[in-house]
Image (cartoon, rainbow, N blue to C red):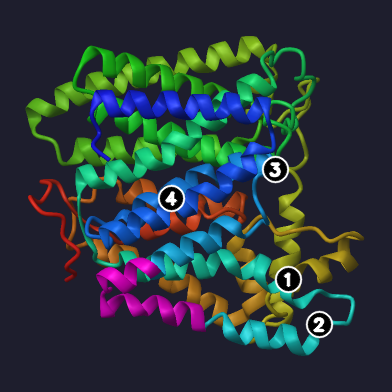
Amino acid sequence: MKNTPLSYGYLLIIHAAIALTVFAIPFLSKIYALLIPIIGFFIVFKTKNRNNEVLLIAGYLVGVEVFLRMTGGNFNNEYIKVAVIIFMLIGMMYSNFSVNGMIYAVFILLLVPGILITTITADFSTDIKKALVFNLSGAVCLGISSIYMYNRRIGFSDLQNILVAIGLPVITTTIYLFLYNPSVQGVVTGTQSNFETSGGFGPNQVSTILGLGIFVFFTQLVLFSKTKKEIFLNIILFVLVSYRGIVTFSRGGIITGVVMICALLAILYLFSSSKSKGKLGFVILLTFIMGLGIWVYSSVQTSGLINKRYANEDSRGRTKKDRLGGRELIMQDEFKLFIDNPVMGIGAGMGKQFRKETFGGEVASHNEISRMLSEHGIFGILGLLLLFIIPFAVYINNRQHLYFLSFYFFWLLTINHASMRTAAPAFIYALTLLWVEIRVPKKAENSLN
């Protein structure tokens, strides 16, 4: 996929048309969900993954997941994660993998004790298979993706193509949101997360993928816009995605997108020459002005309620007691469960059952860190330490990976407010492990360090 004005614009038009088509004929969402892996398999088998095509396909699957869930196209909640895992395994079959990447196999093995505890302690009313798949599919997706991407050489422009593959279905999602809810003013009455402005789906997950889209189109604007037409086009995309993300009233994804942009600008500034720093300062100023304009428009459209949302106030301006929408209670409960079961934990996927006794209902965890502690005990701590440390060990010798911090922060912040319900945090985490070369190799390399 060459990132040229013609192909880029053509692909955007196609994905806008997909939104219109699915909105008009909802059943086509399932056809869309079925065609993506089929076409992906055809591409990968034809090319034998010579140019890491599996990363483009997997990136596209990550970007389209929320849209498919929103429109009823997903065959089940783990459909995209399983598809990503399969493509990563196919990629290993064709292009091998780094032996050092097998450290992530250790991470997967650290989950096994928690599985054993679940099978032993779960009562008859618990669907063990469902509980394990729901809670471990994201971790397994992360582990398999990381094994494939560990120290895999890739050109910076090829990495950007992966981001574009993620971003194209984000445009489909954004257009669909405008069709589903053309008037924000008519549905915003409070400061809680809004399902109407989120396409009738979970605002947290919609906000997460739109926040990632904000970063994608910011990078397209700042680093890959060579003409005035491209600049104008990417400004429009950045504005539209940002606006629809903000009005979901789910803060996590938008804050994450802003942090990703700030991390990128910091890296660019740090490694720029004195002459380039002046130009970058101008870019930062324009970014701030553009962001301020989007915020002001969002505030007008929501009658100022969005300001109160981010100030943690209700519609009457009263400060809310909790800042995380009730997540504090769940986290406190999970830390208590860890303290009571520090070695083996309570078992993978058993958190819901324990919280049923505490809260009177099966409340899902929003925080992957506290969940790993409560359900896996000391093995969860060891697994988290691996995830925290290894990307920096790889990055020390690969400072050309300009997106490293942005990707790392996306994973870290997302698992703290949306756990690993979607494939996005798993896949984006694995992208931190790529060996990125600023100059695109004449021939795409699959060789590993």
Look at the image and tell me in which quarter the N terminus lies: top left
Please tell me whether residue 202 is drawn above or below residue 431 in the rendered image: above
Q: Earlier in the sequence, mark 1 or mark 2?
A: 2
Q: CA distance from mark 1 to mark 2?
A: 10 Å
What segment carries the magenta color?
A: 90-109
Where disc 2 sits, the SS reads loop
Tell me whether circle 1 and circle 2 mark residues in contact (CB < 8 Å).
yes
Residue, disc 1: 131
Tell me which residue sits at (36%, 38%) in the image: 164
Percent x, y of residue 76: 68, 56
Q: CA distance from mark 4 to mark 2?
A: 40 Å
Tell me whether circle 4 and circle 2 mark residues in contact (CB < 8 Å).
no
Mark 3 or 4: the one toward you:
4
Percent x, y of residue 198: 67, 31
Q: CA distance from mark 3 to mark 1?
A: 22 Å
Tell me which residue sits at (23%, 55%) in the image: 51
